[in-house]
Image: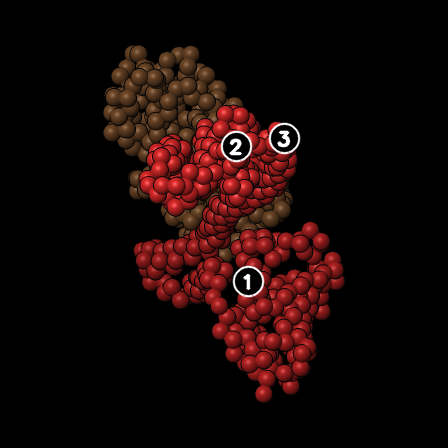
Amino acid sequence: MDAVLDTSAERFTPASERAEALFQEHLFEVHRRADIMFAILMAVQWVFGVVLSLVVSPWAWEGKVRSVHVHVYAAVILGGLLSGLPIAMVMRRPGWVANRYVIAVSQMLWSALLIHLTGGRIETHFHVFVSLAFLSFYRDWRVLVPATIVVAADHLIRGLLWPESVYGILFPEWWRFLEHAFWVLFEDIVLVFACLNGAAELRAATERRAQVEILSEIDRTKTEELATALEALEKSQEARMRTEKLAAVGQLAASVGHELRNPLAAVRNAATYVQRRVTDPRFAGQPASADPKVAEFMQLMLRELDASSKIIADLLDFARERKPAMNPCPLHPLVQEALTVIPQIGVRVVNEVPEDLPVPSLDKDQFRQILVNLIQNGMEAASGKPDAQVIVRAEGGGGRAPWVIRIIDNGTGMPREVLEKIFQPLYTTKVKGTGLGLAVVWNVVHAHKATIEAKSEEGKGSQFIIALPAAAGAAAAE
Amino acid sequence: MRILLVDDEKSLLLTLAANLELDGFDVTTAESGQHALDLFETSHFDLVLSDIRMPGMNGVELFRAIRAKRPDFPVILMTAFALEGMVKDAIAEGVFTVLPKPFDVSHVVSALTTALKAPVVLVVDGETDAASAVELLHGAGVRAMHGTGADQVLAEVRGGRVDVCVVDLELSATSAPDLIDRIKKEDPTIAQIAIAGHDVAAVMRRAAASGVFLCLQKPVTAESLVEAVAKARARSRATATAR
């Protein structure tokens, strides 16, 4: 079995390896989704930026002339560049590592642009914080680094060179930059933790999934291998049974052939004798009837032919496992009927089956056959004893009680080793005999869902006990 | 001629005995090997014809017991089994022949008649080989003699004691197929066994065509030679009785 069924886990991909693969797969999916989200956001921001520049910026801090201000061009062209590059990259290769860094930078530059377009309104500064939060969707803290650098650089440089553009006033306090930087760093710290936590959770989840997957893979493989092994076993068993059956058939043929040859040889000799007695010119004038041997041999031929028929009938009984045709059949007359077909050999047979016994349901022909076989065996075992007899008894059958039928002889009995084998086909202790009689009995008894048991005591006799289940009488119960 | 017929099958015993009596044999019957051995020790018989499969002492055991007392005594066995180990042993030990059941009465009669004549197997061969073949047969308790030269062989055949001829197809002096034909002409009831060398397919075919009973290929073992002789003796000899 070991050779066939290897259930050790070594054959399977290790869980850690599978978990890593799953983790990478999930992470990529996270990146891809974030990429797409940002691509859409970029497009929306661009439209928003253009609208904003058209509606707000002309009045914000230079709003004396309503005209297409340079800010509108800035929004259209700069915004277009800021959004166009990441969108193009995401469309070309969603999930790619470079995307998120480009997106981080773009997003921060968008913040700068929006801040500039609104003239440093505090609301647009929130854009920075929201963008950082969005970037943390990548669950990759490294993305926050370029974003932070960009936002810091922007604030620092523009704060120095063009403070209006950042803070909306010409002379901001010196700590303005530090205030902004503090808040950005604070958010960064929170987001880095969030990213690390998110990644760790994802890893834990994928590890669990990998375990489950591998376990179920082992299970499935095990089940498949078991099924294969079972199938192979069934096949080999079938083949062995066929071989055994063929061997049994061969043995049966040899045994039956041998049994038939002896009566055939005798018949042939007898026929030859009668023929010669009739045709040989030496016996001209002497009628064949004057030779007592002629009549004797005719008788002998009939007897031997009957014996041959019996052997063939046994064989057919054995070969034909007919399903019993169950009919109500009283036992006393059945035993009586069996007795009429058994040749007398000087052994008394007593039918002690009560005539008023409840009537079981059984196959009359088959059951008579097994009674004949069992009674005949008993008679042969007892023959030669001065008080040789076979008794047939039956009891039970009322209500739920099974019928118990006993065939008891006071013959030679059987030793244990014989008793163990008597129901096997071809097993025989007789010099003449095919070893089929009790095998037929066994088959018939089991076809009736009944049981048979043999008890024996050497020198004292044997008894065969058939127990016919109460259900067998159901059809007959009135 | 007194025959002791042994079989546990009463029907066969009765009918075969009756037939043999019609043929003029004096038949005594026994239903067991032990009974037969008792009779053998107390009365005179010329031949024992016994079944092999019997309860108690079987036919082969009976044959051995008889051989132990009278090494030359002819015993014929009968069996309903085509081939069994016991048959092989019996043949190797020199039982005259084994007859398969059921058989024709005339077949038994011809086997009995031949056996009662205490026939001899004539081995025709180059000097040394022939001697060893004769020894092989003797070793198995089969009467055998050695013939050299066509004239001596034919003289023996004419003598009437020979029932089987074993002819080596590689004879140097005489042409073997010729000799086979001449023996057959002299006595058609003689069974001829040809022994072929290594490259004699054509000669073998010629021999088979001229009615050789069996061809053996060299090297011939004692077992196969003795078995061939027993088979030749068991063959139906309608021609022999018709003579």
Q: Secondary structure at mark 3?
A: loop
The label on residue A175 is: 3
What colour do you see for chain A? red
Instruction: Assess disc 1: are there few (<14), some (14-19) or many (≥20) residues with their C-alpha within 10 Å of its C-alpha.
Output: some
- Eyeballing the image, is A83 above or below B56? above
Percent across and percent down for residue A445 are 58, 66
Which chain's residue wears label 1?
A
Instruction: Spot the brown chain and give its letter.
Output: B
Q: List x then y, in percent, for residue A472.
A: 59, 75
Label of residue A443 in the image: 1
For the point 49% across and 73% down, the residue is A325
Q: Is residue A120 above or below residue A293?
A: above
Mark toward the viewer: 1 or 2: 2
Label ID, residue B91:
none
Could you give the CA–CA distance between mark 1 and mark 3, rounded to whole angstroms? Answer: 108 Å
- The picture places residue A347, in percent across and down from the top left corner, at 64, 69
Read off the residue under disc 2: A170
Secondary structure found at label 1: helix
Q: Is residue B122 visible?
A: yes
- Measure the alpha-carbon separation of dots 2 and 3: 14 Å
The label nearer to you, 1 versus 3, is: 3
